[in-house]
Amino acid sequence: MARIDIDFGPVTRITVDAIGQPGQRVFYVQGSTRDDTITLIIEKIQIQTLALGLEQFLDDLKKDHHDLGDTPAEYVEPEMHITPPVDPLFRVGELALGYDPERDLMVLMANEVVMEGQNPEEAGVVRFWATRAQMRAMTHFGVAVANMGRQICPQCGQPMDPAGHFCPKKNGHKH
């Protein structure tokens, strides 16, 4: 299989979203241009970590590039949901952020997860080029999506399964 290496963008839209019921959701990152869409599978924790990393990265950019204005996190929720067809190219293993000051574009680099026995040199990579505002909106929406999951048990701090929750703190007892 040929190695996937795609520079994608600048995108007209970039988002993260989930499909499925809480506890069984699959998370995606999706970027679109006028002509094409690329969708990748991502983990919930990667969305949360990306949001934290992006905020720090944008703060550092402002320190290094004093002429950059504020980056709003405004978005219209219906426009942030992924669009069909949802045919993921690969599952993301690592994410990285970068910035091109000449184009004033950020890059979200998504590296394919490396399976056991797979040569790391054969893993795919997609680079989504987007504005700072698009990236911030994507991560803010992503955190909102990630937080729409299962309720947390006040006793043990673990996510509660809607079908029933076995709480280790209660040793299986209801009261």
Image: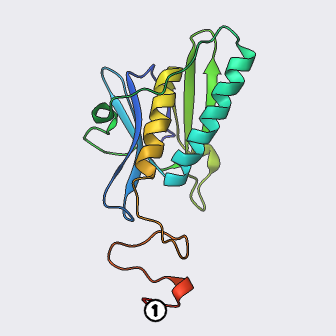
Residue 163 in the image: x percent, y percent?
32, 77
Quarter residue 111 falls in: top right
In this rendered view, identify the residue nearer to me: 168 or 20.
Answer: 168
Q: Residue furthest front?
A: 175
Q: Is residue 119 left or right of residue 41?
A: right
**What residue does disc 1 label?**
173
**Vertical placement of residue 36 versus 146, above or below:** above
Residue 18 as seen in the image, left or right of residue 52: left
Q: Is residue 93 visible?
A: no
Q: Position of residue 164 (x, y in %)?
A: 36, 80
Total numbered badges shown on the rendered structure: 1
Secondary structure under badge 1?
A: loop
Compared with 58, 3 (above or below) is below
Which residue corresponds to the image point at 42% horizontal and 64% vertical from the top-left?
151
Q: Residue at x 47, y 90 (%)?
A: 172
Position of 122 with respect to 141 (left or right) is right
The image quadrant that residue 13 belongs to is: top left
Given residues 63 and 170, the one toward you in this image is 170
Q: Residue at x 62, y 12 (%)?
A: 68
Q: Is residue 113 visible?
A: yes
Quadrant in the picture for the C terminus: bottom left
How packed is label 1: few (under 14 Cα within 10 Å), some, or many (20 or more)?
A: few
- Which image quadrant for residue 86? top left
Residue at the extreme left of the image, as rendered? 84
**Residue 155 in the image: x percent, y percent?**
53, 76
Residue 7 at x, y = what percent?
50, 26
Q: Amino acid at mark 1?
A: His
